[in-house]
Amino acid sequence: MNMDTIEKNQLWEKALAEIELSVSRPNFLTWFQNTNIADQNNDVVILNVPNTFVKEWLSNKYHKIIIKALRALSPAVRNVEYVIAPQALNNQKVAPRSKPLPKIIDGEQLEFDEVYIDKTANLNPRYTFENFIVGSFNELAYAASQAITKNLGFSYNPLFIYGGTGLGKTHLLQAIGNKIKQDIPNVKVQYLTSEKFANEYVTAMQNNTIPSFKEKYRQHDLLIIDDVQFFSAKFKFQEEFFHVFNALYEANKQIVFSSDRPPKAIAELEERLRSRFEGGMLAAITPPEYEARKAILQAKAAQKELIIPEEILEFIANNIQNNIRELEGALQSVFAQSKLLGKIPSLQEVKEMLQKNIKSRRKTTITRLIKTVAEFYNISEKDIFEQTRKKQIVFPRQIAMYLLREDFNSSYPYIGEKFGGKDHTTVIHAYEKIANHVKNDEKIQEDIKQIRELLYAKEV
Ligand code: ADP
Ligand code: MG
């Protein structure tokens, strides 16, 4: 039986929806993305998978679940075969880019003031495997990171770890570097952010030292590049990076990347680079569930030799859900407060303290949203509040209102008040108008995507 593409896609979409229910979120993201049905021969479904690791993993661990899901939808299915189908890599011509280099976004950079083990490697000894807490939300990324330290260049290459801000990507990447340095003294390791890489490249270009730039990177045994989502806006380096990366890869040098989103969600990522990223091992880190959050707090409190009542830890674990850095921050406040008071604060005091933090963070984010929208549409921040019906002002203002509602759940009256005492019906109208456009207008979808990218990529 030959199925057409739509049938195949639909069958697999439905099967995935079923599979998702019986597999943890990180596992699902890690093993099932970039899979699709290639064909169905009689009772055998041929599944395309991106690489060997995924093939082994699916056939060893998820074979039964996959067959069960497919059979529920298409009872004739008896077996599944896995076929590696990497995307075409080298036969695409890349058009020369004529756009100027965009301004480099000032992202979350690691500026280590602390002691370095090794300045050139840029590793901070604070980040180790030993003090990394493992739960189901990060165990795959952790296991893959451990695996590459045991067989550098030959187990998972490249390793691509992705997940939201403050979930431990940098910690893991640094732990890999530290472990390797410790195990193999003469190894050449380098950790850097994608921005640093881009900056070095620009400098090399200006100084006519591109050959030595390339030579330098080709000598690394382990190259770790953090936050590669910033490559999305930096067209020029992508091609260069692809070549540097390819040279390393072909020499079996280990490469590790992190990003706040999977490769396919990085806008404007060059296709060859994307398929290279996807051709290795992609490991997701998802936000930790409640029990894990509590365990993290307990472990961190113990490291500080701080005895904090269970109810306080539970309160923090309940209220800070998406970010381990914030969990640490909350604990740090409790710690600071205890020093100040000479005793552990009460639950009530902790509540008040955290509420204040949450509120002020919210306020700065909203201010930044408005600023980001204004900048994006090339108007001044003052203009966006101006009482005018000029289209070039009204439209960005409506976008800002829409995002306040969508992303911050702000009430209509609150938004109206923010924008100079507008009536809430005006806000509703703006929201609905943009919401409608979002459904049909690709340009607006793209605008909103880019604004969100600017806004959240650098969120701390
Ligand atoms: P990301 O790079 O994903 O934004 P980081 O690696 O900077 O996040 O982590 C934020 C903070 O949380 C760091 O101080 C890090 O040590 C800590 N952290 C993150 N994950 C863990 C973990 N699993 N165990 C212990 N600490 C963690
Ligand atoms: Mg980081």
Image: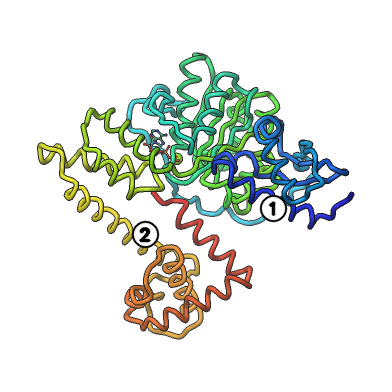
Quarter of the image where one finds residue 125: top left
Query: Which residue position is annotated with label 1?
Result: 13
Say if mark 1 contacts mark 2, CB within 8 Å.
no
Decide if residue 83 is in sight here. Answer: no
Q: Where's residue 161, x and y in %?
A: 54, 37
Between residue 111 and residue 171, name the one nearer to us: 171
Secondary element at image label 2: helix
Nearer mark to the viewer, of 1 and 2? 1
Quarter of the image where one finds residue 241: top right
Ligand 2 lies in which image quarter? Answer: top left
Between residue 322 and residue 212, name the one nearer to us: 322
Cβ of mark 1 under 8 A from ligand 1: no
Q: Is residue 336 left or right of residue 115?
A: left
Q: Residue at x 10, y 41 (%)?
A: 341
Check disc 2: other Cα within 10 Å, few if <14, some if 14-19, many if 20+.
some
Query: Which residue position is annotated with label 2?
Result: 365
Secondary element at image label 1: helix
